[in-house]
Image: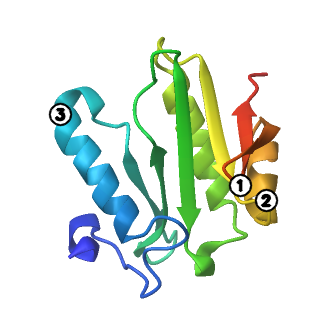
Amino acid sequence: MLAEKLNSVVSKDWPSGEYDRNAMVFFLSCFESGGTAVQGWYGWYAINIDAVSGERSLVGSGGYFGPPDSNGVVEIGYSVLPEWQRRGFAKEIVSALVAHALSFEKTNSIIARTSPVNEASKRVLISSGFRETGINESNLCFEYVSS
């Protein structure tokens, strides 16, 4: 069904990472309760279109934990399927999320969290302009530093 909605090939490994069934249910309930005011602030899908064949493939997802809070803080999250990792998609997803969030005047700060053992995610965040700010609930915390 997702493949049909996205007009894309969807791997048998979908969903990946922490974007599991519980996360999907959570984000759907947030979207449903928030209505049109929260459109664009939850889940996005990353699709690769092969330059030669034109085949569309789901490579991952990204999004926010909601619109900016009362302090203007936005938290991002992202996940890339294993077969698409190490090709720059995570950095592209993070860059798009940051640019989109910063296009809203209410956004004052962008944060992200990752497991301390997820070296790849730490590298993506740091190379995308984030700096480590500490640890919270056993996750490393990062904040975007505008250039």
10 Å crowding of disc 3: few (<14), some (14-19), many (20+):
few
The single residue placed furthest to the top in the displayed view is 105
Q: Compared to 144, does 12 lie above or below?
A: below
Q: CA distance from mark 1 to mark 3?
A: 32 Å
Q: Earlier in the sequence, mark 1 or mark 3?
A: 3
10 Å crowding of disc 1: few (<14), some (14-19), many (20+):
few
The answer to which quarter of the image holds residue 87 is bottom right
| Helix, strand or loop for disc 3 | helix
Contact (Cβ within 8 Å) of mark 3 with mark 2: no
Display colour scheme: rainbow
Going by the numbered disc 2, the residue's amino acid type is Pro
Marker disc for residue 23: none
The answer to which quarter of the image holds residue 90 is bottom right
Marker disc for residue 35: 3
Contact (Cβ within 8 Å) of mark 1 with mark 2: yes
Marker disc for residue 116: 2
Q: Nearer the viewer, mark 3 or mark 2?
A: 2
Marker disc for residue 138: 1
